Amino acid sequence: MSKLQQQLYLVMIEGYVSCQQWKTVQATISEAFDQVCTSLHKPLWLWKVIAMSKEGKITLDGIEKLKESNASLQAQVYGNLARSSCSLLHQKGFYLKAIEVKIVF
């Protein structure tokens, strides 16, 4: 049941993302963290980091949570952060971090 719950939350989150409703994305993710077992949180952390970035909030805590996950997911997060960043300097840094994560692992 928990995997189904995770998938339902991810569909809702993607719908809110498509409408750029970042506060609703954050609220839905928080609810999902309470309802879905911890072993299924990785994709939720991905969206949390992206939503926090879109709202201009610090994303380091979300990225730290992803350090336990696979390199592909970490690189995807950094790539998404790079694409959503308004600063060219931040974009460059996030792309370099994505490359570094893939090389190290």
Image (cartoon, helix red, strand yellow):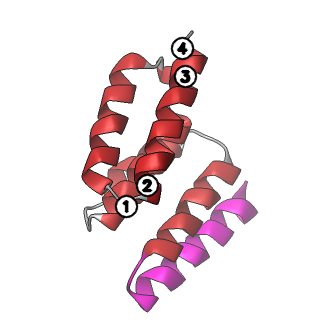
Direction from residue 102 to residue 5 in the image, left or right: left
Q: Secondary structure at mark 3?
A: helix
Q: Earlier in the sequence, mark 2 or mark 3?
A: 2
Residues under numbered marks 1 and 3 in contact, where contact means CB atoms less than 8 Å apart: no
Rendered residue at 53%/46% (across/down): 67
User: Does the stretch in magenta take in 71?
Assistant: no
Q: Amino acid at mark 2?
A: Val
Q: Which mark is residue 81?
A: none
x then y, percent, for residue 70: 67, 44
x then y, percent, for residue 101: 64, 61
Looking at the rendered image, the quarter that the C terminus falls into is: bottom right
Q: Secondary structure at mark 4?
A: helix
User: Does the stretch in magenta take in 89?
Assistant: yes
Residues under numbered marks 2 and 3 in contact, where contact means CB atoms less than 8 Å apart: no
Q: Quadrant of residue 95?
A: bottom right
Residue occupied by mark 1? 20
Rendered residue at 25%/51% (across/down): 23
Residues under numbered marks 1 and 2 in contact, where contact means CB atoms less than 8 Å apart: yes
As measured in the structure, the alpha-carbon distance from the residue carrying label 4 to the one carrying label 3 is: 10 Å
Q: Which mark is residue 39?
A: 3
Q: Is residue 67 above or below residue 98?
A: above
Residue occupied by mark 2? 17
Residue occupied by mark 4? 2
